[in-house]
Image (spheres, rainbow, N blue to C red):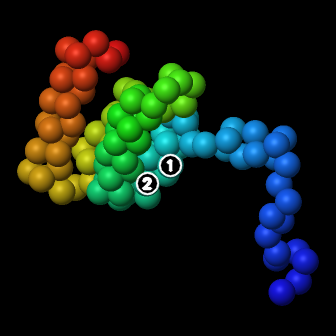
Amino acid sequence: PSDECSINTNVGDRELDLLEDCRPNTITYNEVIHAWANARNPRRAEALLRRMMAASHEHSDDEGGDEYDLKPDTIAFNAVLHAWASSGEGRDAALRCEDLIRHMEVLYEAGND
């Protein structure tokens, strides 16, 4: 393999710090959720939202979890709601939207705004 394709295993501390800064955050997830919503793929948009929720919950238990900056917000939920609403999938889409709104209400009542 050429040198261009090889992986540099001599990564220094500064480079490791930069790699940690590349961890996806709320904005990153929101952009990809919007991309799936705009591609008229509500299932992928919702799957990514649920992955975001799981990762947020997983990292909230970590020490320094607030620094991770990953928390599903109304932007993410609204993008998925819009994807379902414009999907043309009728009753199934309406039920998915209703389920998401219920989940948002639960989060709000638990103090997550």
Point 54% across, 31% down: residue: 68
Furthest-right residue in this view: 3
Disc number for residue 36 = 2
Q: Position of residue 94 (x, y in %)?
A: 14, 44
* Residue count near mark 2 (Cα–Cα under 10 Å), binned few <14, some 14–19, many ≥20: many
Disc number for residue 100 = none
Query: In terms of image quadrants, where is residue 106?
Result: top left
Labels 1 & 2 near each other (Cβ < 8 A): yes
Point 23% across, 16% down: residue: 110
Q: Relative to 87, is 13 above or below?
A: above
Query: In terms of image quadrants, where is residue 23?
Result: top right
Q: Secondary structure at mark 1?
A: helix
Q: Which residue is mark 1?
A: 32
Q: Relative to 16, is 9 above or below?
A: below
Count of numbered circles in the view? 2
Question: Observer-nearest residue: 81 or 4?
Answer: 4
Q: Is residue 21 left or right of residue 14?
A: left
Question: Observer-nearest residue: 20 or 100?
Answer: 20
Q: Position of residue 11 (x, y in %)?
A: 83, 54
Q: Relative to 9, is 54 above or below?
A: above
* Residue count near mark 1 (Cα–Cα under 10 Å), binned few <14, some 14–19, many ≥20: some
Q: Quadrant of the N terminus?
A: bottom right
| Amino acid at the residue labelled 1 | Val
Q: Secondary structure at mark 2?
A: helix
Q: Is residue 48 visible?
A: yes
Q: Quadrant of the C terminus?
A: top left
- Gap in angstroms between the C-alphas marked 1 and 2: 6 Å
Q: Position of residue 83 (x, y in %)?
A: 33, 47
Point 35% across, 34% down: residue: 57
| Amino acid at the residue labelled 2 | Trp
Q: Relative to 48, is 4 above or below?
A: below
